Protein backbone atom coordinates (compact mmCIF):
# COMPACT_ATOMS: atom_id res chain seq x y z
CA UNK A 1 0.00 0.00 0.00
CA UNK A 2 1.35 3.44 -0.84
CA UNK A 3 2.07 5.85 1.93
CA UNK A 4 -0.83 8.31 1.67
CA UNK A 5 -0.44 11.40 3.81
CA UNK A 6 -3.58 12.21 5.81
CA UNK A 7 -5.76 15.28 5.30
CA UNK A 8 -4.12 18.65 5.75
CA UNK A 9 -1.31 20.47 3.99
CA UNK A 10 1.57 18.29 2.86
CA UNK A 11 3.96 20.22 5.05
CA UNK A 12 1.91 19.53 8.15
CA UNK A 13 1.59 15.90 7.17
CA UNK A 14 5.31 15.54 6.63
CA UNK A 15 6.07 17.25 9.92
CA UNK A 16 3.53 15.07 11.65
CA UNK A 17 4.96 11.94 10.13
CA UNK A 18 8.50 12.86 11.05
CA UNK A 19 7.61 13.79 14.63
CA UNK A 20 5.70 10.55 15.04
CA UNK A 21 8.70 8.62 13.84
CA UNK A 22 10.97 10.51 16.21
CA UNK A 23 8.78 9.77 19.23
CA UNK A 24 8.62 6.12 18.24
CA UNK A 25 4.83 6.19 18.16
CA UNK A 26 3.09 3.85 15.78
CA UNK A 27 3.39 4.92 12.19
CA UNK A 28 0.40 6.46 10.43
CA UNK A 29 0.92 4.38 7.33
CA UNK A 30 1.27 0.72 6.68
CA UNK A 31 2.70 -1.31 3.88
CA UNK A 32 1.38 -4.31 1.99
CA UNK A 33 2.74 -6.73 4.50
CA UNK A 34 4.14 -5.12 7.61
CA UNK A 35 6.23 -7.34 9.82
CA UNK A 36 5.22 -6.52 13.35
CA UNK A 37 7.73 -7.34 16.08
CA UNK A 38 5.84 -7.51 19.35
CA UNK A 39 7.42 -5.52 22.21
CA UNK A 40 6.27 -8.39 24.44
CA UNK A 41 8.92 -10.74 22.97
CA UNK A 42 11.88 -11.46 25.23
CA UNK A 43 14.94 -9.37 24.23
CA UNK A 44 16.89 -12.33 22.79
CA UNK A 45 14.04 -13.61 20.68
CA UNK A 46 13.19 -10.08 19.69
CA UNK A 47 16.72 -9.53 18.43
CA UNK A 48 16.58 -12.73 16.39
CA UNK A 49 13.19 -11.87 14.96
CA UNK A 50 14.44 -8.43 14.11
CA UNK A 51 17.44 -9.85 12.31
CA UNK A 52 15.38 -12.10 10.10
CA UNK A 53 13.29 -10.70 7.33
CA UNK A 54 13.42 -7.77 4.98
CA UNK A 55 13.54 -4.08 5.86
CA UNK A 56 13.61 -1.13 3.53
CA UNK A 57 14.98 2.21 4.76
CA UNK A 58 13.47 4.76 2.45
CA UNK A 59 11.87 8.15 1.83
CA UNK A 60 8.33 8.13 0.47
CA UNK A 61 9.01 10.45 -2.48
CA UNK A 62 12.37 9.00 -3.53
CA UNK A 63 12.33 7.58 -7.07
CA UNK A 64 15.32 5.44 -6.07
CA UNK A 65 13.41 4.01 -3.14
CA UNK A 66 10.41 3.42 -5.37
CA UNK A 67 12.55 1.26 -7.66
CA UNK A 68 13.13 -1.07 -4.71
CA UNK A 69 9.47 -1.02 -3.65
CA UNK A 70 8.38 -1.93 -7.17
CA UNK A 71 10.89 -4.79 -7.33
CA UNK A 72 9.78 -6.13 -3.94
CA UNK A 73 6.15 -5.90 -5.04
CA UNK A 74 6.89 -7.67 -8.31
CA UNK A 75 8.35 -10.54 -6.29
CA UNK A 76 5.57 -10.39 -3.65
CA UNK A 77 8.13 -10.10 -0.86
CA UNK A 78 6.90 -9.13 2.61
CA UNK A 79 8.97 -6.39 4.17
CA UNK A 80 9.05 -3.73 6.84
CA UNK A 81 9.11 -0.18 5.53
CA UNK A 82 11.05 2.40 7.57
CA UNK A 83 10.48 6.03 6.62
CA UNK A 84 13.66 8.03 7.20
CA UNK A 85 13.86 11.66 8.22
CA UNK A 86 16.80 12.80 6.14
CA UNK A 87 17.48 15.80 8.37
CA UNK A 88 17.75 13.43 11.32
CA UNK A 89 19.04 10.13 9.99
CA UNK A 90 18.42 7.04 12.06
CA UNK A 91 21.25 5.11 13.67
CA UNK A 92 20.22 2.13 11.62
CA UNK A 93 20.65 4.07 8.37
CA UNK A 94 24.03 5.45 9.40
CA UNK A 95 25.14 1.98 10.46
CA UNK A 96 23.76 0.27 7.34
CA UNK A 97 25.10 2.77 4.80
CA UNK A 98 28.13 4.40 6.43
CA UNK A 99 29.68 5.21 3.03
CA UNK A 100 26.91 7.34 1.52
CA UNK A 101 24.42 7.64 4.41
CA UNK A 102 21.62 7.60 1.81
CA UNK A 103 18.37 5.80 1.22
CA UNK A 104 17.26 3.38 -0.06
CA UNK A 105 18.90 0.61 1.92
CA UNK A 106 17.56 -2.93 1.86
CA UNK A 107 18.35 -4.93 4.98
CA UNK A 108 17.92 -8.66 4.45
CA UNK A 109 18.39 -10.87 7.52
CA UNK A 110 20.40 -8.06 9.09
CA UNK A 111 22.67 -7.52 6.07
CA UNK A 112 22.44 -4.19 4.25
CA UNK A 113 22.42 -3.73 0.47
CA UNK A 114 22.86 -0.18 -0.89
CA UNK A 115 22.40 1.63 -4.22
CA UNK A 116 18.99 1.16 -5.81
CA UNK A 117 19.99 -0.66 -9.01
CA UNK A 118 22.21 -3.00 -7.01
CA UNK A 119 19.31 -3.61 -4.61
CA UNK A 120 16.95 -4.38 -7.52
CA UNK A 121 19.40 -6.89 -9.01
CA UNK A 122 19.85 -8.46 -5.58
CA UNK A 123 16.07 -8.78 -5.18
CA UNK A 124 15.91 -10.42 -8.60
CA UNK A 125 18.61 -12.94 -7.70
CA UNK A 126 17.35 -13.83 -4.24
CA UNK A 127 13.66 -14.18 -5.15
CA UNK A 128 13.54 -15.73 -8.60
CA UNK A 129 10.01 -15.82 -9.92
CA UNK A 130 7.99 -16.28 -13.09
CA UNK A 131 8.78 -12.73 -14.13
CA UNK A 132 12.49 -12.10 -13.75
CA UNK A 133 13.59 -8.47 -13.62
CA UNK A 134 16.72 -9.16 -15.66
CA UNK A 135 16.55 -11.34 -18.76
CA UNK A 136 18.49 -14.60 -18.92
CA UNK A 137 20.45 -13.84 -22.10
CA UNK A 138 23.82 -12.19 -21.28
CA UNK A 139 23.62 -9.68 -24.14
CA UNK A 140 20.09 -8.64 -23.18
CA UNK A 141 21.28 -8.31 -19.58
CA UNK A 142 24.16 -6.07 -20.67
CA UNK A 143 21.72 -3.92 -22.63
CA UNK A 144 19.36 -3.69 -19.64
CA UNK A 145 22.22 -2.67 -17.35
CA UNK A 146 23.42 -0.11 -19.89
CA UNK A 147 20.08 1.63 -20.16
CA UNK A 148 19.38 1.50 -16.42
CA UNK A 149 22.81 3.06 -15.94
CA UNK A 150 21.89 5.71 -18.55
CA UNK A 151 18.79 6.60 -16.54
CA UNK A 152 20.97 6.86 -13.42
CA UNK A 153 23.58 9.06 -15.08
CA UNK A 154 21.18 11.41 -16.85
CA UNK A 155 17.57 11.62 -15.67
CA UNK A 156 17.83 12.54 -11.99
CA UNK A 157 20.56 15.19 -12.30
CA UNK A 158 19.04 16.95 -15.28
CA UNK A 159 15.49 16.60 -13.95
CA UNK A 160 16.55 18.18 -10.66
CA UNK A 161 17.84 21.23 -12.51
CA UNK A 162 14.42 21.67 -14.09
CA UNK A 163 12.79 22.43 -10.74
CA UNK A 164 15.80 23.81 -8.86
CA UNK A 165 16.93 26.52 -11.28
CA UNK A 166 15.27 29.89 -11.00
CA UNK A 167 15.12 30.46 -14.75
CA UNK A 168 17.03 32.08 -17.56
CA UNK A 169 19.54 30.47 -19.83
CA UNK A 170 20.57 27.71 -17.44
CA UNK A 171 16.99 26.49 -17.17
CA UNK A 172 16.53 26.65 -20.93
CA UNK A 173 19.70 24.59 -21.39
CA UNK A 174 18.54 22.05 -18.82
CA UNK A 175 15.20 21.74 -20.59
CA UNK A 176 16.86 21.11 -23.96
CA UNK A 177 19.19 18.58 -22.41
CA UNK A 178 16.30 16.81 -20.69
CA UNK A 179 14.27 16.57 -23.88
CA UNK A 180 17.29 15.03 -25.60
CA UNK A 181 17.65 12.49 -22.78
CA UNK A 182 13.97 11.53 -23.05
CA UNK A 183 14.16 11.28 -26.83
CA UNK A 184 17.20 9.00 -26.53
CA UNK A 185 15.26 6.76 -24.15
CA UNK A 186 12.21 6.88 -26.41
CA UNK A 187 14.31 5.83 -29.41
CA UNK A 188 15.54 2.86 -27.41
CA UNK A 189 11.98 1.96 -26.39
CA UNK A 190 10.76 2.18 -29.98
CA UNK A 191 7.51 0.30 -30.47
CA UNK A 192 8.18 -2.19 -27.71
CA UNK A 193 5.73 -2.73 -24.87
CA UNK A 194 8.48 -2.30 -22.29
CA UNK A 195 12.18 -1.49 -22.57
CA UNK A 196 13.04 -5.18 -22.42
CA UNK A 197 10.39 -6.14 -24.95
CA UNK A 198 7.38 -8.08 -23.73
CA UNK A 199 8.63 -8.35 -20.16
CA UNK A 200 8.61 -5.55 -17.59
CA UNK A 201 12.18 -5.30 -16.35
CA UNK A 202 15.17 -3.42 -14.97
CA UNK A 203 15.06 -0.39 -17.26
CA UNK A 204 11.32 0.09 -16.75
CA UNK A 205 11.83 -0.11 -12.99
CA UNK A 206 14.76 2.32 -13.20
CA UNK A 207 12.80 4.95 -15.13
CA UNK A 208 9.14 4.70 -14.18
CA UNK A 209 9.38 6.42 -10.76
CA UNK A 210 10.57 9.59 -12.50
CA UNK A 211 7.33 9.74 -14.51
CA UNK A 212 5.52 11.07 -11.42
CA UNK A 213 7.88 14.04 -11.60
CA UNK A 214 7.10 14.79 -15.27
CA UNK A 215 4.27 17.16 -14.37
CA UNK A 216 6.62 19.23 -12.19
CA UNK A 217 9.39 19.22 -14.79
CA UNK A 218 6.91 20.41 -17.43
CA UNK A 219 5.42 23.09 -15.22
CA UNK A 220 8.67 24.64 -14.07
CA UNK A 221 10.60 24.35 -17.34
CA UNK A 222 7.67 25.13 -19.62
CA UNK A 223 7.31 22.24 -22.05
CA UNK A 224 5.10 19.22 -22.73
CA UNK A 225 6.53 15.72 -22.49
CA UNK A 226 3.46 14.34 -24.28
CA UNK A 227 4.29 16.57 -27.24
CA UNK A 228 7.98 15.73 -27.26
CA UNK A 229 7.82 12.01 -26.41
CA UNK A 230 4.35 10.56 -26.75
CA UNK A 231 5.63 6.94 -26.91
CA UNK A 232 7.29 7.37 -23.56
CA UNK A 233 4.08 8.74 -22.07
CA UNK A 234 2.15 5.71 -23.41
CA UNK A 235 4.81 3.42 -21.97
CA UNK A 236 4.39 5.09 -18.56
CA UNK A 237 0.60 4.47 -18.71
CA UNK A 238 1.20 0.78 -19.52
CA UNK A 239 3.57 0.47 -16.57
CA UNK A 240 1.01 2.01 -14.24
CA UNK A 241 -1.41 -0.79 -15.14
CA UNK A 242 0.90 -3.12 -13.21
CA UNK A 243 -0.11 -3.50 -9.56
CA UNK A 244 3.50 -3.13 -8.36
CA UNK A 245 3.80 0.26 -10.06
CA UNK A 246 0.29 1.50 -9.35
CA UNK A 247 0.62 0.97 -5.63
CA UNK A 248 4.11 2.47 -5.41
CA UNK A 249 3.92 5.61 -7.52
CA UNK A 250 2.34 8.81 -6.25
CA UNK A 251 -0.01 11.03 -8.21
CA UNK A 252 1.94 13.74 -10.06
CA UNK A 253 -0.01 16.41 -8.18
CA UNK A 254 1.23 15.00 -4.86
CA UNK A 255 4.81 15.07 -6.09
CA UNK A 256 4.23 18.56 -7.40
CA UNK A 257 3.15 19.74 -3.93
CA UNK A 258 6.28 18.14 -2.54
CA UNK A 259 8.48 19.81 -5.17
CA UNK A 260 6.88 23.15 -4.29
CA UNK A 261 7.90 22.52 -0.70
CA UNK A 262 11.46 21.71 -1.85
CA UNK A 263 11.66 24.87 -3.95
CA UNK A 264 10.78 26.96 -0.91
CA UNK A 265 13.35 25.09 1.14
CA UNK A 266 16.08 25.76 -1.44
CA UNK A 267 15.04 29.37 -1.92
CA UNK A 268 14.02 28.90 -5.56
CA UNK A 269 10.77 30.71 -4.91
CA UNK B 1 37.81 -20.39 -27.27
CA UNK B 2 36.48 -17.42 -29.17
CA UNK B 3 38.09 -16.78 -32.52
CA UNK B 4 39.71 -13.44 -33.13
CA UNK B 5 36.98 -12.20 -35.42
CA UNK B 6 34.20 -12.91 -32.91
CA UNK B 7 35.49 -10.50 -30.27
CA UNK B 8 36.79 -6.99 -30.83
CA UNK B 9 37.77 -4.39 -28.27
CA UNK B 10 37.75 -0.68 -29.09
CA UNK B 11 40.10 0.95 -26.61
CA UNK B 12 42.65 3.65 -25.89
CA UNK B 13 46.01 2.68 -24.42
CA UNK B 14 46.06 4.49 -21.10
CA UNK B 15 42.37 4.24 -20.24
CA UNK B 16 41.90 2.44 -16.92
CA UNK B 17 38.40 1.49 -18.08
CA UNK B 18 39.85 -0.22 -21.13
CA UNK B 19 42.43 -1.98 -18.93
CA UNK B 20 39.55 -3.44 -16.87
CA UNK B 21 38.11 -5.12 -19.95
CA UNK B 22 41.53 -6.34 -21.08
CA UNK B 23 42.13 -7.96 -17.69
CA UNK B 24 38.72 -9.65 -17.80
CA UNK B 25 39.33 -11.00 -21.31
CA UNK B 26 42.76 -12.24 -20.23
CA UNK B 27 41.33 -13.92 -17.12
CA UNK B 28 38.98 -15.84 -19.40
CA UNK B 29 41.70 -16.48 -22.01
CA UNK B 30 39.54 -14.99 -24.76
CA UNK B 31 41.25 -14.22 -28.05
CA UNK B 32 40.22 -10.86 -29.45
CA UNK B 33 41.07 -8.18 -31.94
CA UNK B 34 42.34 -5.04 -30.25
CA UNK B 35 41.50 -1.82 -32.04
CA UNK B 36 43.19 1.30 -30.71
CA UNK B 37 41.39 4.62 -31.04
CA UNK B 38 44.72 6.25 -31.90
CA UNK B 39 43.77 9.91 -31.83
CA UNK B 40 41.25 9.89 -29.03
CA UNK B 41 43.16 12.48 -27.01
CA UNK B 42 42.96 14.77 -30.05
CA UNK B 43 39.19 14.35 -30.05
CA UNK B 44 39.05 12.06 -33.07
CA UNK B 45 36.72 9.10 -32.96
CA UNK B 46 36.48 6.28 -35.48
CA UNK B 47 33.28 5.55 -37.37
CA UNK B 48 33.16 2.15 -35.74
CA UNK B 49 33.27 3.74 -32.27
CA UNK B 50 30.55 6.27 -33.11
CA UNK B 51 28.39 3.52 -34.56
CA UNK B 52 29.00 1.12 -31.66
CA UNK B 53 28.54 3.61 -28.84
CA UNK B 54 26.32 6.37 -30.22
CA UNK B 55 25.02 7.29 -26.77
CA UNK B 56 28.29 8.04 -24.96
CA UNK B 57 30.82 7.86 -27.83
CA UNK B 58 33.40 6.47 -25.40
CA UNK B 59 35.77 3.57 -25.11
CA UNK B 60 35.97 0.80 -24.14
CA UNK B 61 33.46 -0.96 -26.36
CA UNK B 62 33.41 -4.73 -26.63
CA UNK B 63 31.99 -6.01 -29.90
CA UNK B 64 30.92 -9.65 -29.72
CA UNK B 65 29.42 -11.27 -32.84
CA UNK B 66 29.04 -7.70 -34.18
CA UNK B 67 26.97 -6.64 -31.15
CA UNK B 68 28.40 -3.82 -29.04
CA UNK B 69 28.55 -3.74 -25.23
CA UNK B 70 29.47 -0.46 -23.53
CA UNK B 71 30.51 0.74 -20.05
CA UNK B 72 33.48 -1.10 -18.58
CA UNK B 73 31.83 -2.69 -15.54
CA UNK B 74 28.91 -3.85 -17.67
CA UNK B 75 31.39 -5.30 -20.19
CA UNK B 76 33.29 -7.11 -17.41
CA UNK B 77 30.06 -8.67 -16.10
CA UNK B 78 29.09 -9.65 -19.64
CA UNK B 79 32.50 -11.31 -20.16
CA UNK B 80 32.02 -13.18 -16.88
CA UNK B 81 28.59 -14.45 -17.94
CA UNK B 82 29.47 -15.38 -21.53
CA UNK B 83 32.89 -16.95 -20.95
CA UNK B 84 32.59 -19.08 -17.82
CA UNK B 85 35.79 -20.35 -16.30
CA UNK B 86 37.20 -21.90 -13.16
CA UNK B 87 37.72 -18.44 -11.73
CA UNK B 88 34.50 -16.45 -11.96
CA UNK B 89 34.81 -12.67 -11.74
CA UNK B 90 31.62 -12.34 -9.69
CA UNK B 91 30.90 -14.68 -6.79
CA UNK B 92 27.86 -16.93 -6.89
CA UNK B 93 26.27 -15.78 -3.62
CA UNK B 94 23.78 -12.94 -4.26
CA UNK B 95 24.85 -10.93 -1.20
CA UNK B 96 28.54 -11.21 -2.10
CA UNK B 97 27.60 -10.14 -5.64
CA UNK B 98 25.75 -7.10 -4.32
CA UNK B 99 28.80 -6.13 -2.24
CA UNK B 100 31.12 -6.60 -5.22
CA UNK B 101 28.90 -4.39 -7.36
CA UNK B 102 28.70 -1.79 -4.59
CA UNK B 103 32.47 -1.48 -4.23
CA UNK B 104 33.13 -1.55 -7.98
CA UNK B 105 30.58 1.26 -8.25
CA UNK B 106 32.39 3.07 -5.39
CA UNK B 107 35.61 2.99 -7.44
CA UNK B 108 33.65 4.48 -10.35
CA UNK B 109 31.87 7.15 -8.33
CA UNK B 110 34.51 8.07 -5.77
CA UNK B 111 37.97 7.20 -7.05
CA UNK B 112 38.12 7.45 -10.83
CA UNK B 113 37.00 11.06 -11.26
CA UNK B 114 39.54 12.32 -8.71
CA UNK B 115 42.39 10.07 -9.82
CA UNK B 116 41.89 11.11 -13.42
CA UNK B 117 41.69 14.79 -12.60
CA UNK B 118 44.24 15.36 -9.82
CA UNK B 119 47.28 15.15 -12.11
CA UNK B 120 45.85 17.81 -14.48
CA UNK B 121 45.27 20.58 -11.96
CA UNK B 122 47.40 23.63 -11.33
CA UNK B 123 48.29 24.55 -7.75
CA UNK B 124 45.31 25.97 -5.95
CA UNK B 125 42.04 25.29 -4.20
CA UNK B 126 40.68 22.86 -6.77
CA UNK B 127 43.84 20.76 -6.57
CA UNK B 128 43.67 20.67 -2.77
CA UNK B 129 39.99 19.69 -2.81
CA UNK B 130 40.55 16.96 -5.39
CA UNK B 131 43.53 15.57 -3.47
CA UNK B 132 41.52 15.57 -0.26
CA UNK B 133 38.63 13.64 -1.85
CA UNK B 134 41.00 11.13 -3.43
CA UNK B 135 42.85 10.52 -0.18
CA UNK B 136 39.64 10.13 1.86
CA UNK B 137 38.15 7.70 -0.62
CA UNK B 138 41.36 5.66 -0.90
CA UNK B 139 41.27 5.41 2.88
CA UNK B 140 37.71 4.05 2.69
CA UNK B 141 38.74 1.58 0.01
CA UNK B 142 41.75 0.41 2.01
CA UNK B 143 39.53 -0.13 5.06
CA UNK B 144 37.26 -2.31 2.91
CA UNK B 145 40.24 -4.35 1.72
CA UNK B 146 41.47 -4.83 5.27
CA UNK B 147 43.67 -7.90 5.66
CA UNK B 148 42.15 -9.73 2.71
CA UNK B 149 44.20 -11.03 -0.18
CA UNK B 150 41.80 -9.48 -2.68
CA UNK B 151 38.69 -7.34 -2.27
CA UNK B 152 36.48 -10.42 -2.65
CA UNK B 153 38.57 -12.48 -0.22
CA UNK B 154 40.63 -15.33 -1.60
CA UNK B 155 39.44 -14.82 -5.16
CA UNK B 156 40.46 -12.09 -7.57
CA UNK B 157 37.24 -10.49 -8.76
CA UNK B 158 35.19 -7.55 -9.92
CA UNK B 159 36.38 -4.95 -7.41
CA UNK B 160 40.04 -5.87 -7.96
CA UNK B 161 39.50 -5.55 -11.71
CA UNK B 162 37.69 -2.23 -11.22
CA UNK B 163 40.48 -0.67 -9.17
CA UNK B 164 43.79 -2.28 -10.23
CA UNK B 165 44.17 -0.23 -13.46
CA UNK B 166 44.52 2.88 -11.29
CA UNK B 167 47.63 1.44 -9.65
CA UNK B 168 49.53 2.46 -12.80
CA UNK B 169 48.87 6.06 -11.73
CA UNK B 170 50.56 5.64 -8.31
CA UNK B 171 54.04 6.23 -9.73
CA UNK B 172 52.89 9.47 -11.38
CA UNK B 173 51.10 10.66 -8.22
CA UNK B 174 54.36 10.30 -6.35
CA UNK B 175 56.52 11.80 -9.11
CA UNK B 176 54.23 14.85 -9.36
CA UNK B 177 54.44 15.30 -5.60
CA UNK B 178 50.73 14.68 -5.11
CA UNK B 179 50.53 11.54 -3.01
CA UNK B 180 52.60 8.54 -2.01
CA UNK B 181 50.30 5.53 -1.99
CA UNK B 182 53.15 3.34 -0.73
CA UNK B 183 53.50 5.50 2.39
CA UNK B 184 49.89 6.45 3.06
CA UNK B 185 48.12 3.28 1.95
CA UNK B 186 50.55 0.37 2.42
CA UNK B 187 47.77 -2.23 2.29
CA UNK B 188 46.59 -0.97 -1.10
CA UNK B 189 50.18 -0.86 -2.34
CA UNK B 190 50.74 -4.47 -1.20
CA UNK B 191 47.44 -5.56 -2.79
CA UNK B 192 48.54 -3.89 -6.05
CA UNK B 193 51.76 -5.93 -5.99
CA UNK B 194 49.80 -9.14 -5.39
CA UNK B 195 47.51 -8.37 -8.33
CA UNK B 196 50.40 -7.80 -10.68
CA UNK B 197 51.58 -11.37 -10.01
CA UNK B 198 48.56 -12.45 -12.03
CA UNK B 199 49.32 -12.80 -15.74
CA UNK B 200 46.10 -11.11 -16.78
CA UNK B 201 47.02 -7.99 -14.80
CA UNK B 202 50.71 -7.93 -15.65
CA UNK B 203 50.05 -7.94 -19.36
CA UNK B 204 47.16 -5.46 -19.28
CA UNK B 205 48.26 -2.70 -16.92
CA UNK B 206 49.70 0.49 -18.36
CA UNK B 207 53.42 0.57 -17.65
CA UNK B 208 53.77 3.20 -14.86
CA UNK B 209 56.86 4.96 -16.28
CA UNK B 210 55.40 5.15 -19.79
CA UNK B 211 52.18 6.53 -18.31
CA UNK B 212 54.21 9.07 -16.37
CA UNK B 213 55.84 10.27 -19.61
CA UNK B 214 52.43 10.53 -21.27
CA UNK B 215 50.92 12.44 -18.34
CA UNK B 216 53.98 14.74 -18.05
CA UNK B 217 53.67 15.70 -21.67
CA UNK B 218 49.96 16.43 -21.16
CA UNK B 219 50.73 18.52 -18.05
CA UNK B 220 53.14 20.65 -20.08
CA UNK B 221 50.45 21.23 -22.74
CA UNK B 222 47.93 22.13 -20.04
CA UNK B 223 50.43 24.48 -18.41
CA UNK B 224 50.43 22.61 -15.12
CA UNK B 225 54.18 22.67 -14.84
Image (cartoon, rainbow, N blue to C red):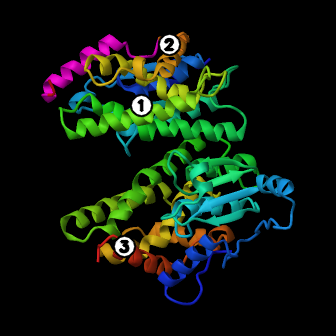
- Is residue A125 shown in magenta? no
Q: Is residue A247 above or below residue A37?
A: below
Q: Residues within 10 Å of mark 2 (few under 14, many from 20)?
A: some
Identify the element where label 3 is drawn. Answer: helix
Q: Position of residue A196 (x, y in %)?
A: 59, 53
The quarter holding residue B129 reads: top left
Q: Which residue is mark 2?
A: B193
* Quadrant assignment for the C terminus of chain A: bottom left
- Which of marks 1 and 2 precedes in the sequence? 1
SS assignment at label 1: loop
State which mark lies toward you, 3 or 1: 3
| Main secondary-structure element of the magenta-colored stretch | helix
Image quarter where the N terminus of chain A lies is: bottom right
Are labels 2 and 1 assigned to the same chain?
Answer: yes
- A266 vs B6, left or right, is left
Tell whether position B221 is magenta: yes
Give the Cα separation between the discs numbered 3 and 1.
42 Å
> Label 2 lies in what chain?
B
Q: Residue at x 59, y 68 (%)?
A: A239
Camera-nearest residue between B157 and A56: A56
Are discs 2 and 3 located on one and the same chain?
no
The location of residue B32, given as percent across then percent down, is: 50, 19
Question: Position of A63 compared to A244: left or right?
Answer: left
Q: Is residue A193 visible?
A: no
Residue B60 image label: 1
* Whether marks 3 and 1 lie on the same chain: no
Foreground residue among B161 and B57:
B161
**What residue range appears in magenta?**
B203-223
Residue B113 against residue A162 in the figure, above or below: above
Bin the neighbour count of mark 1 within 10 Å (Cα to Cα): few under 14, some 14-19, many 20 and up: many
Q: Chain of mark 3?
A: A
Residue bearing the label numbered 3: A265
Amino acid sequence: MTFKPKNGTLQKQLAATFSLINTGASRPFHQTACVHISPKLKPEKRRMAEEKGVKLLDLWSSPFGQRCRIALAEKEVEYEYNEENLSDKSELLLKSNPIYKKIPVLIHDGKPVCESLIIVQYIDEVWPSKTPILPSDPYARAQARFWADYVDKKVYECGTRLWKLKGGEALQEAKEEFILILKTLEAELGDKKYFGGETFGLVDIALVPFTSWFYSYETYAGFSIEQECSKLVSWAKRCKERASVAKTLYEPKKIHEFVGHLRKKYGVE
Amino acid sequence: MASEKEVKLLDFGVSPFGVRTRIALAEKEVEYEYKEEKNLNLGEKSELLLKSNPVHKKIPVLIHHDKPICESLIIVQYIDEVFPSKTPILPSDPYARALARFWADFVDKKISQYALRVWKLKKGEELEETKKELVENLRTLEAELGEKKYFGGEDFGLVDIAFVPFTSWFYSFQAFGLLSVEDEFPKLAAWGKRCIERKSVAKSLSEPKKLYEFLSARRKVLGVE
